[in-house]
Amino acid sequence: MAVSSSEALCPHRLVLEHVTSRWGVLVLILLLDRPYRFSELRRAIGAQGGRGVSEKMLTQTLQTLERDGLVHRDARPVIPPRVDYSLTDLGREAAEQVRALADWTDRRMDDVEKARRAYDEARAAS
């Protein structure tokens, strides 16, 4: 893959975008528990609630995370073909950070909602 101009200018931000993207977060958190096959991972993401991920988007997400060294793709030459996805050591470290942020969001959501209501009320009053 060629290096894009945005990647050359700010590689840190690009990796952060990959890790914290809508599907990147879910992929990393799910892979913390165990390796998944593609279809298993897609179903597990759908079971998290909300809209499921398309095959194309999951493929792109996995390829991006693999390129960044966070996900390992293990393709076995069996019939039918078997491909498993797991975290690398680097990916496990990133996933633990992402999960900590997700856990914080769960714990503090009531406070966020309260702040949103206060903000909206103040904006409506002005």
Image (cartoon, rainbow, N blue to C red):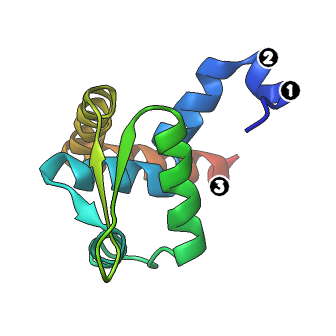
Tell me the kind of residue under disc 3: Ala
Q: Name the residue at 53% across, 30% down.
A: 16
Residue occupied by mark 3:
124
Q: Name the residue at 33% across, 34% down.
A: 91
Q: Name the residue at 13% across, 52% down.
A: 33
Residues at marks 3 and 2, CA–CA distance in whole angstroms:
41 Å
Residue occupied by mark 2:
9
Tell me the kind of residue under disc 1: Ser
Disc on the earlier residue, 1 or 3: 1
Residues at marks 1 and 3, CA–CA distance in whole angstroms:
42 Å
Return the x and y of residue 67 as percentages of the image width and height: 54, 38
Residue 113 can be seen, yes or no: no
Return the x and y of residue 102 as percentages of the image width and height: 28, 44
Evaluate if marks 1 and 2 touch, with contact meaning CB atoms under 8 Å apart: yes
User: Which image quarter holds the N terminus?
Assistant: top right
Residues at marks 1 and 2, CA–CA distance in whole angstroms:
6 Å
Mark 3 is surrounded, within 10 Å at the Cα level, by few (under 14), some (14 to 19) or many (20 or more) other residues, namely few
Evaluate if marks 1 and 3 touch, with contact meaning CB atoms under 8 Å apart: no
Q: Name the residue at 21% across, 43% down.
A: 103
Return the x and y of residue 36 as percentages of the image width and height: 24, 63
Instruction: Single out the residue that lies furthest toward the left.
Output: 33
Q: Is residue 109 toward the left or the right of residue 116 in the image? A: left
Mark 1 is surrounded, within 10 Å at the Cα level, by few (under 14), some (14 to 19) or many (20 or more) other residues, namely few
User: As rendered, which of 107 and 3 lies closer to the eye?
Assistant: 3
Q: Which mark is residue 53?
A: none
Instruction: Single out the residue that lies furthest toward the bottom.
Output: 80
Q: Secondary structure at mark 3?
A: helix
Residue 9 falls in which quadrant of the image?
Answer: top right
Residue 80 can be seen, yes or no: yes
Residue occupied by mark 1:
5
Q: Secondary structure at mark 2?
A: helix
